[in-house]
Amino acid sequence: MLSLSVVIPSFNRAHFLPRAIESVRSQIEAGDEIIVVDDGSTDNTESVVNQIGDARIRYIRQAKAGAGAARNRGVREATGDLIAFQDSDDEWLPGKAALQREFLAAHPDILFCFTDLGRDYGGTRHALLRGGLWHQDLRDWADILTPAVRYLDCDVYIGDLYHGAMYHNYFSIICTMIRREEAGDAIRFAEGVATFEECECFGRIAGRGQCAFLDRIGALQHKHTGPRITDADWVARAESRLTILQNVWGSDPRFLAQYGEEYRALVNQVRLARVRGLIALGKPRQARAEIRSLAGVPWLYRAASHVPASVINPVVALRHAIHNLLAPPESAQVQT
């Protein structure tokens, strides 16, 4: 049997950790391990982990360095043949680990596999990868990868996602299982970015080998009032994405030789998104500085970048208020 290491980074999530750990602990075997990386928590995370009393759990504390650094620490400490991840506020569903481990054991040519992600908000469950709600690619998985093959009672789609991952975040970190040694240093998360740190890891491993999407919900994202990836503002999101694009695809000469024009066009789009964010945040001077080095900037952006922040800020605040007022309940925003 392929051994498994599961990395769980956590920062002040002691109240959520027992659910996250137990959902993993109930699925692992005697030779597996759970690595909890405490990223500088100030709550009782350590005591919560120690109270579980399972020798397969390793607790590691480090100074606050962010989610990417915490996951990277866990990767360095891992010893299993396979590596998977859990977030401290979410949950694996029964059978996830067994399905992925057995699939990878039966398919040695597949570098990594991932299941669908479910969202559980108030007891209502929705699939996020199947219909493109998570990654915004509305094509069927048969078109994104290849037509389905059957494995046990699950449809599986196999293929190469390196090029596509430049545009879309197809994976959820808590749904993914990777061959640790074969992927090697590709299992590395971005550090020093505000968000999207997992996209760097996904892009790198997608460039190392084939993947498989197992069409079954394997993990749940739970709603809560704490911080999430979507909390980052527009500018921070654009800047994080630019960093990751450069680190992965922009640093790959063979990829650029074939897709360089696409890459540069996408970078330009993301820089335009940064301009929009700067204008929306009432930072017209910074927006104008960005515009000066960009091609094809719409005239509306140029005009808006000359509007004083004292005018822009109330307009943006009103727009957000109207959007929140008219938005349907979250249960109506996602489809099964």
Image (tube, rainbow, N blue to C red):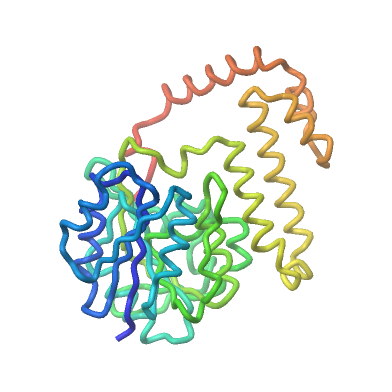
| Quadrant of the image containing the N terminus | bottom left
Q: Residue at x 15, y 63 (%)?
A: 53
For the residue pair 211 and 3, the one nearer the viewer reads as 3
Quadrant of res 162:
bottom right
Q: Residue at x 41, y 59 (%)?
A: 130
Q: Picture coordinates of residue 34 (x, y %)? A: 29, 67
Q: Picture coordinates of residue 304 (x, y %)? A: 73, 23
Q: Residue at x 36, y 78 (%)?
A: 80
For the residue pair 331 and 287, the one nearer the viewer reads as 287
- Position of 265 with respect to 102 (left or right) is right
Q: Is residue 29 above or below residue 10?
A: below
For the residue pair 42 and 165, the one nearer the viewer reads as 42
- Position of 300 with respect to 155 (left or right) is right
Asked if one can make out residue 329 in the rendered structure from this viewpoint, the answer is yes
Quadrant of res 305:
top right
Asked if one can make out residue 217 in the rendered structure from this viewpoint, the answer is no
Q: Picture coordinates of residue 282 (x, y %)? A: 64, 22
Q: Residue at x 39, y 51 (%)?
A: 39
How many numbered callouts? 0
Q: Is residue 43 above or below residue 198?
A: above
Q: Picture coordinates of residue 179 (x, y %)? A: 44, 78
For the residue pair 44 and 294, the one nearer the viewer reads as 44
